[in-house]
Image (spheres, helix red, strand yellow):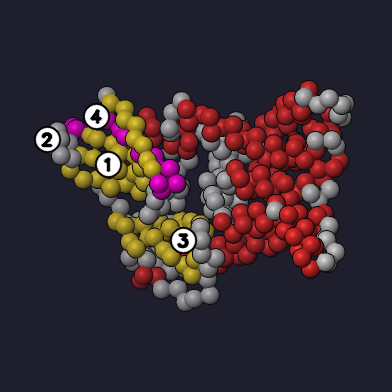
Amino acid sequence: MDPITNSLAAFALSRTGLGRLSRRGEAALILGASLPDLDYLSALFSPVNLFSFVGGPFHALLAAPLLAAGLAALIRLNSRRPIAFARMWLLSLAGIALRLALDLLGVDGVQLLYPFDRAWFHLDILPWFDPWLFLLLLGYAFWPWISHLVNLEMGIRQATGKGIAFVVILLAAGYVGYRAANHAEAISVIANFSYAGNVPLREACFPDVYSLVRVRCVVETDSHFANIDYFVGENFDATEAQLLKRQNQPVWQVAQFQSAWYQQLSNRLRMPYWTVFPADFPTGAREAVMQDLVLAPEPYPRFRLRILLDSRERLLEETLVVNTLGFDHFESTLRR
């Protein structure tokens, strides 16, 4: 989940009365929800960290009480009046817990059990940025100003912020439930069809960013990957799936074995799809390109890995292409 939506969700939670349990309680909740974003600083050292480290150690259950303790101590040290450390720690921990829950709902996932288990946990219910949830929470953030204008214009009694906070949280929970029901329906339907004559080996579905009735899915079979646009409430036609034939397995297996960046990314990947084709230079060389059909789908894939192999299938160079929200991209190349 994007940092701004996380902060807005923490703000709404604080206005239910939770933020009044301690002085600077609201700040503890909001900063706690933002604290795991410290892992974005790892991108300064290597672009691959955006996918191999972000969502990892700072999002682990083991790290949560430690981060909360650090934040509580920092807030207490910067307060002119005494603040109960235990209460501040609990509020900070609540903000971090909210953040982990929201990130768990996403496609990217989090390493909740790090360092004991480096698996990525994800429910695939919400996109990284959900504009509808964002607008709901942003509207509540501006509610005091809107309510004041309504009160002046119409002379009605101003609603209490606490009651509206509960309404917004219930609306947000209902929205997440709607997205979850759509996801479950899509998974259950597409799993019952064959694609290019093959039954699915595994399926993954993830929400469309803007459409509330479109769910994007990927199915893996022995011979193909299938990209699927599933629309809730409509009859599903498996023949309309976009089929991507799996290519020359020995070549890309050699490529991923030799690639240092692939080794860092491999634990994070969901549905890696490889294409292999002749390279322009040197003679006899081949290029293997990997994209993840779930984490980096078209039309704006977040990353691609290009690996150049010589005629003897030895790695010459590997290039990681990283896109920034579909507006810009940068490349980083390692050569042997």
Front in this rendered view, residue 199 or 168: 168
Q: Left or right: where does residue 73 sit relative to residue 323?
A: right
Kindly report which numbered mark, 3 or 1, lies closer to the viewer in this rendering. Answer: 3
Q: Place residue 172 in its image quadrant.
A: bottom right
| Span highlighted in magenta in the image | 310-327
Q: Position of residue 52 (x, y in %)?
A: 48, 35
List the residue tagged with mark 1. 288
**Vertical side of 23 occupied by 195: above or below:** below
Of the image marks 2 and 4, the number of the one nearer the N terminus:
2
Per the model, the C-alpha gap separating discs 2 and 4 is: 13 Å
**Vertical side of 38 occupied by 248: above or below:** below
List the residue tagged with mark 2. 283
Per the model, the C-alpha gap separating discs 1 and 4 is: 12 Å
Q: Residues within 10 Å of mark 1 (few under 14, many from 20)?
A: many
Q: Position of residue 332 (x, y in %)?
A: 34, 31
Q: Name the image quarter holding the C terminus.
A: top left
Indicate the secondary structure of the residue bearing disc 2: loop
Indicate the secondary structure of the residue bearing disc 4: strand
Indicate the secondary structure of the residue bearing disc 1: strand
List the residue tagged with mark 3. 216
Q: Is residue 102 magenta?
A: no
List the residue tagged with mark 4. 316
Q: Place residue 130 in its image quadrant.
A: bottom right
